[in-house]
Amino acid sequence: MKIKNRLLEIRLKKGYKFQKDFAEFLGIGQYQYNRHEKNKIQPNLETTFMILKKLDIDFFELYYKDND
């Protein structure tokens, strides 16, 4: 079981075509955002709270369990 995020889905739903623009909106670097979006690494707790606040969503709208 892995914990994954829905950053790609959220980015596209919000109308951001490019990772660079969405990363800038969130206030994080593009490289860091890319690794988060591809679920290579997960944001630390501080970054997670910043993202949740910026997007005005709750934890479970951002994360889900992947049973693969």
Image (cartoon, grey):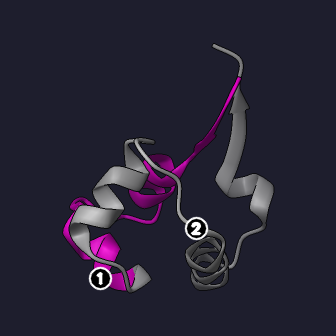
Residue 20 included in the magenta stretch of the image? yes
Q: Left or right: where does residue 20 sit relative to residue 35?
A: left
Name the one closer to the observer, 37 or 18. 37
Name the one closer to the observer, 17 or 25. 25
Q: Nearer the viewer, mark 1 or mark 2?
A: 2
Q: Position of residue 20 (x, y in %)?
A: 20, 70
Q: Position of residue 36 (x, y in %)?
A: 42, 54
Residue under the image location 40 percent in, 50 percent down = 37
Nearer-N-terminus badge (1/2): 1
Q: Left or right: where does residue 42 sit relative to residue 25?
A: right
Q: Position of residue 62 (x, y in %)?
A: 66, 55
Residue under the image location 77 percent in, 62 percent down = 59
Q: Quadrant of the C terminus?
A: top right
Q: Position of residue 48 (x, y in %)?
A: 62, 71
Q: Left or right: where does residue 22 sit relative to residue 65?
A: left
Disc 1 secondary structure class = helix
Quadrant housing residue 45? bottom right
Please tell me whether residue 62 is drawn above or below residue 9 in the rendered image.
Answer: below
Name the one closer to the observer, 15 or 62. 62
For the image shown, how many numbered marks are present on the structure? 2
User: Could you tell me how far apart the alpha carbons at marks 1 and 2 are, in whole angstroms?
Assistant: 18 Å
Q: Residues within 10 Å of mark 1 (few under 14, many from 20)?
A: few
Looking at the rendered structure, the kind of residue marked 2 is Asn
Q: Quadrant of the N terminus?
A: top right
Instruction: State the extent of the magenta-drawn residues as a range.
Output: 1-25
Please tell me whether residue 6 is drawn above or below residue 16 in the rendered image.
Answer: above
Q: What residue is disc 2 on? A: 44
Residue under the image location 33 percent in, 52 percent down = 35
Disc 2 secondary structure class = loop
Q: What residue is disc 1 on? A: 24
